[in-house]
Image (cartoon, helix red, strand yellow):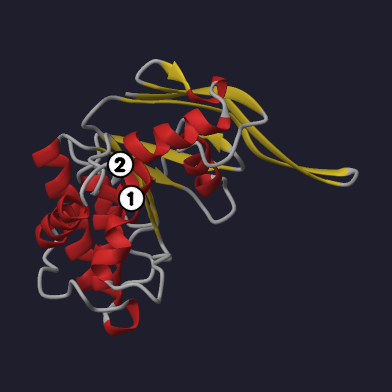
Amino acid sequence: MIEAKDLHKIYKNGASQLHVLKGIDLKVEKGEVLAVFGPSGAGKSTLLHLLGGLDAPTKGEVYINGIDIYSMNGYERAKLRNRKIGFVFQFYHLLPEFDALENVVLPLLIKVENRKFRDIRERGIEILTAVGLNERLHHRPNQLSGGEQQRVAIARALVNDPEILLCDEPTGNLDSETGKQVLDLLWNLNRKQNLTLIIVTHENEIAKVAEKVLYIKDGRVMSAVPSFVTSDIRN
């Protein structure tokens, strides 16, 4: 379970301040899908970074399984991120000099001490096969399509068996058909592994499968979700 209480984020630049998040509260139970909508600049990506321990709030708390992650020191929080949370971004952030398999196993190399590389490699192959890339193991990013690169990024996010997957516009750089394939992959992972998904998106399709929808505007959660979103939410 992941919970945020009264999250604020203020960026300072000299005498000026930008108040990006203004008291966000949310709770997502294990296995739920939360879709986060809102206009550009509303604070959606900032919220995702705070939930994942990538950036500290100016005020407020984030709890994962009842533990306040910002009461931890930096090392403890990094360890939690590596073991409990997977990240998928709009831009794939794959290392261009590494092939698909090498990109995927990097988090395992960070996590695991005294584990044979053969076992790490087998886990990488297993997860790439699960996302349909068993024939692309040794292709570098520039040899892969956009959809294939995003699937490599998803495999990398999943290789440590996280409880929570945070996705920031995961289909933003993909055509509609490839985007649908990526979303179908995420839904299957949610169902089969009881994976908690929090997805920042502009895609109304996501509202059809999300248990919860959050609409953020000007750094605040809006009590009324716009009709262009609610018209697609399942009953």
- Tell me if residue 192 comes above or below residue 169 in the rendering: above
| Along the viewing direction, whichever of 172 and 134 lies nearer the viewer | 134
Q: Position of residue 68 (x, y in %)?
A: 49, 19
Residue type at the position of mark 2 = Val
How many numbered marks are there? Answer: 2
Residue type at the position of mark 1 = Leu
Residue at position x 24%, y 72% in the image = 148
* Residue 109 circle label: 1
Q: Position of residue 111 (x, y in %)?
A: 34, 42
Residue at position x 47%, y 30% in the image = 223
- Tell me if residue 15 comes above or below residue 94 in the rendering: above
CB contact under 8 Å: marks 2 and 1:
yes
Residue 59 falls left or right of residue 146: right
Mark 2 surroundings: few (<14), some (14-19) or many (≥20) residues within 10 A: few
Q: Which picture quadrant has residue 205?
A: bottom left
Residue at position x 33%, y 36% in the image = 83
Mark 1 surroundings: few (<14), some (14-19) or many (≥20) residues within 10 A: some
Mark 2 highlights which residue? 112
* Residue 43 circle label: none
Quadrant of the frame with the N terminus: top left
In the current view of this chain or complex, which residue is farthest to the bottom? 143
- The reply to whether residue 31 is in sight is yes
In the current view of this chain or complex, which residue is farthest to the right? 15
Inter-mark Cα distance, 2 to 1: 6 Å
